[in-house]
Image (cartoon, rainbow, N blue to C red):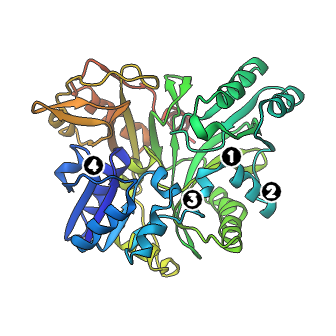
Amino acid sequence: MNVLLLGSGGREHALAWKMSASPLLTRLYASPGNPGIGRLAELVKLDISDHSAIAAFCQDKTIDLVVVGPEAPLVAGIADDLRAWGIRVFGPSKAAARLEGSKGFTKDLCAKFNIPTAAYGRFSDLASARAYVEQTGAPIVIKADGLAAGKGVTIAMTLEEALAAIEACFDGAFGAAGAEVVVEEYLTGEEASFFCLCDGATALPFGTAQDHKRVGDGDTGPNTGGMGAYSPAPVMTPEMTDRTMREIIEPTMRGMAELGAPFAGILFAGLMITDQGPKLIEYNTRFGDPECQVLMMRLKDDLLVLLNAAVDGQLAHMSARWSDEAALTVVMAARGYPGTPEKGSVIRGLDEAASEGAEIFHAGTAINGGALVANGGRVLNVTALGATVGEAQRRAYAAIDRIDWPQGFFRHDIGWRAVEREKAGG
């Protein structure tokens, strides 16, 4: 098979790494890719927003499958446009991608199909949103309705914080994404990421993870796109997985089909495991980043076989096997992130770090004058396996110790919750 992978981050590097191990693969192209992906694929310069140019490339190179990594092109309808050209695509339609593209759409779906989630209100004007928040009180959660690169959510612990977040949305802090605001009840419990591979009719459970959104140790500081993750998530016991499938995933699949937008691709449920059971925080319609990195480390099966089955509507006949080992990834970010990151600093020592048994996925790197340099906020994902989360954690941090990048920073406690559980014997 000739495969085209769209995207440039750590998620796409992990997908390229896994697909490149498949005996089905003839040639892998990636656009725009990054230096890490460039070791596995031929990098091509395509405008991801120019769907007809991508279709022409696919026809010219006889592409058998397009794998879309990031959410923005999915929400923009790239899967529909390529399918109209007769090109096979892994990823949901524009109508199905609304599950990520509009938080309000997803909340309304939950209300219609009785899917457990936080109580909420949807607002398109500042005064109504303010009134709702003042009546409800804090803590409360404020979300820009649209895509905001993981930064449109404020967990407001005070009324002042909540009102400031609402005003930021309506003042244009998140562009068009903040033209509508969703205000949600604050849920308490433990968060987990739950993934399903879907073909429109069947949802195949596809791993669990837990990520760390806050920038600082001890879960402090502003939210980011994710500073690290581990898999599996201990809170997702077999019983909790069954409940999640029965109460959240299966009603979503039925509901989307009923709305004329059957979901095919990766359905990524952000969950809060509460005293009452699992509740949906939000849906993403692509692999998480950095959750994808730990899932790909643990997946024992051929990823391309599974993606093909999803595209061809054959998941009812498939299963996915996972390593018993735990995987953990630590994000190394550029100074300044999640604000404006400093770009251009030189990174050395990746080969030495890999000698510790880690996989290092590139997330925001470039080559400048023959040197590897930082070219984004989240720059590297240092990923390791271990018999326990604690062992995977030790291996990942041992690899980081070998990386020479003074301008980078990282959290020192990725996996802390699971490691504490292990130490407590549970």
| Label 4 Cα crowd, 10 Å radius (few <14 / some 14-19 / many 20+) | many
Q: Nearer the viewer, mark 3 or mark 1?
A: 3
The span from disc 3 to disc 2 (Cα, nearest Å) is: 18 Å
Q: Residue at x 49, y 25 (%)?
A: 215
x, y percent for residue 56: 29, 68
> What is the secondary structure assignment of the residue under circle 3?
loop
Q: Earlier in the sequence, mark 1 or mark 2?
A: 2
Gap in angstroms between the C-alphas marked 3 and 1: 24 Å
Q: Name the residue under label 3.
A: 97
Name the mark on residue 111: 2
Q: Is residue 34 left or right of residue 171?
A: left
Q: Is mark 1 on a helix, strand or loop?
A: strand
Characterize the local packing of mark 1: few (<14), some (14-19) or many (20 or more) Cα atoms within 10 angstroms: many
Q: Position of residue 423 (x, y in %)?
A: 51, 34
Q: At label 3, which amino acid type do we have?
A: Ala
Q: What element carries label 4?
A: loop
Of tags 4 and 2, the one toward the viewer is 4
Picture quarter containing residue 392? top left
Q: Is residue 18 visible?
A: yes
Q: In the rendered image of this protein, does residue 303 appear above or below residue 167?
A: below
Residue 166, quarter of the rendered image:
top right
Q: Does residue 414 lie above or below 362 as drawn?
A: above
| Chain-order first, disc 3 or disc 2 | 3
The amino acid type of the residue labelled 4 equals Gly
Is residue 295 or residue 54 the one in the foreground? Answer: 54
The residue identified by callout 4 is 33
* Sooner in the amino-acid sequence: mark 1 or mark 4: 4
User: Residue 178's quadrant in the figure?
Assistant: top right
Give me the residue at 70% from left, 33% from top: 142
Amino acid at pointer 1 = Ile
Q: Which mark is residue 273?
A: 1
In the image, 168: left or right of 69? Answer: right
